[in-house]
Image (cartoon, rainbow, N blue to C red):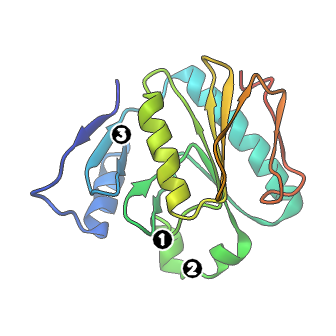
Amino acid sequence: MKPVTIEMDSVNLTDEQFFQLCVKNRNFRFERNAEGDLVIMSPTGGETSNRNAGINAQLWMWNHRSKLGKVFDSSGGFKLPKGGDRSPDASWIPLAKWNNLTPEQQKKFLPLCPDFLIELLSVTDSLKDTRKKMQEYMDNGAKLAWLINRKDKQVEIYREGKEVEILDNPVSLSGENILPEFVLEMELIW
């Protein structure tokens, strides 16, 4: 099922109402764009889910060793500073950001943008819409983001304050200075 966007001009869900909508409908993935429109996505298929698991495993293992922050999978929601509620396929925030959140904030959608995130394009995702979402993350404070397009074996690298770089069939990706010594091995992702 392709994502469906419902314009919410006449309905204004509070943050708590949106959170409860997500909790009570766990078979769907909901996001809200910066305009407050509701984006409904079905769960991914087995192939994409398996690749997402591999991405998250590599990121989690690096973070387990480095102890520099917290890692989140695609079920983790972020309330972005400029509006919108998003759930990247994999994301990371520095430990200091996590520790600055109250225990109550840690239990709900985190009121911040991840410093690092990955979106893995699935067969139902629109490249155009996902690129727009990537820019939304960057506009909200992300420092490094990767859009992985398995079909074309390309990775778009988004960096704070820089033009998007496109890599064709990379063997690995570097976390640069945002995730020191993190390397995502692409062999199992392709």
- Characterize the local packing of mark 1: few (<14), some (14-19) or many (20 or more) Cα atoms within 10 angstroms: some
Is label 3 in a helix, a strand or a loop? Answer: loop
Residue at mark 2 to residue at mark 1: CA–CA distance: 8 Å
Report the side of 177 relative to 90 (left or right). Answer: right
> In the figure, 108 relative to 118: above or below?
below
- Which is nearer the N-term, disc 2 or disc 3? 3
- Residue receiving disc 3: 28
Pinpoint residue 83: horizontal percent, then vertical percent: 37, 64
- Which is nearer the N-term, disc 2 or disc 1? 2
Residue at mark 3 to residue at mark 1: CA–CA distance: 21 Å
Pinpoint residue 93: horizontal percent, then vertical percent: 66, 64
Residue at the limit of the structure toward the top, as seen here:
151
Report the side of 67 relative to 23 (left or right). Answer: right
Inspect the image, locate mark 3, and give the three-letter code of the amino acid beneath it.
Phe
Tags 2 and 1 in contact by the CB under 8 Å rule? yes
User: Does residue 75 appear anywhere in the picture?
Assistant: no
Q: Residue 51 falls in which quadrant of the image? A: top right
- Residue receiving disc 2: 101
Tags 3 and 1 in contact by the CB under 8 Å rule? no
- Which residue is more in the foreground, 7 or 22? 7
Q: Residue 15 falls in which quadrant of the image? A: bottom left
User: Does residue 83 appear anywhere in the picture?
Assistant: yes
- Residue receiving disc 1: 111
**Quadrant (top left, top right, bottom left, bottom right) of the N terminus:** top left
- Characterize the local packing of mark 2: few (<14), some (14-19) or many (20 or more) Cα atoms within 10 angstroms: some
Report the side of 29 relative to 63 (left or right). Answer: left
- Which is nearer the N-term, disc 3 or disc 1? 3
Inspect the image, locate mark 2, and give the three-letter code of the amino acid beneath it.
Leu
Could you tell me which residue is drawn at 37 percent across and 49 percent down? 31
Is label 2 in a helix, a strand or a loop? Answer: loop
Inspect the image, locate mark 1, and give the three-letter code of the amino acid beneath it.
Pro
